[in-house]
Amino acid sequence: MAHTDFSFSQKYFLVQYNIGAQWNEAQPIVVRNSIAVQPKLGSILHAPKPARIVLDLISPKFGFPLTHSDAHPIIHIGG
């Protein structure tokens, strides 16, 4: 297995590019990549500092595969 990601974080959102592969011996390596976007709810709502940290951690992340037509978008909630 191999995986890496690159992130860009701004005050109100995070964008992440993921690339990786998982394989067994005697099978070809299939590389998959995706992009994810996460709004930072604590910052968007201008919450006080302790609440902002919690809201930013539990903000939903929306992931979209960039390869393989049989893949589906996902939503991830929680840090």
Image (cartoon, rainbow, N blue to C red):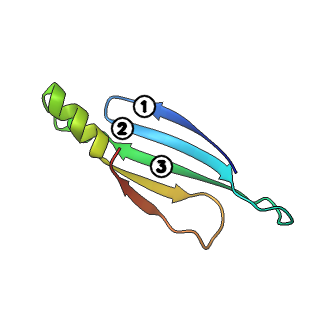
Give, as a three-letter code, the residue at label 3: Ala
Q: Residue furthest bottom?
A: 70
Q: Secondary structure at mark 1?
A: strand
Q: Is residue 21 left or right of residue 46?
A: right
The residue indicated by pointer 2 is 13
How far across and how far down the image is residue 46, in percent?
16, 32
Q: Residue at x 79, y 59 (%)?
A: 29
Residue at the image position 36 percent from the left and 38 percent from the top: 13
Given the image, on which type of amino acid does mark 1 rest? Answer: Ser
Would you say the residues marked 2 and 1 are in contact, meaning their CB atoms lie under 8 Å apart? yes
Sequence order check, earlier mark of 3 and 2: 2
Q: Secondary structure at mark 2?
A: strand
Asked whether residue 23 is in view, the answer is: yes
Q: Within the image, what quadrant is residue 14 found in? A: top left
Distance from disc 2 to disc 1, alpha carbons, whole Å, reads 6 Å
Q: Which residue is mark 3?
A: 36
Q: What label sits on residue 9 in the rendered view?
A: 1
Amino acid found under the numbered disc labelled 2: Phe
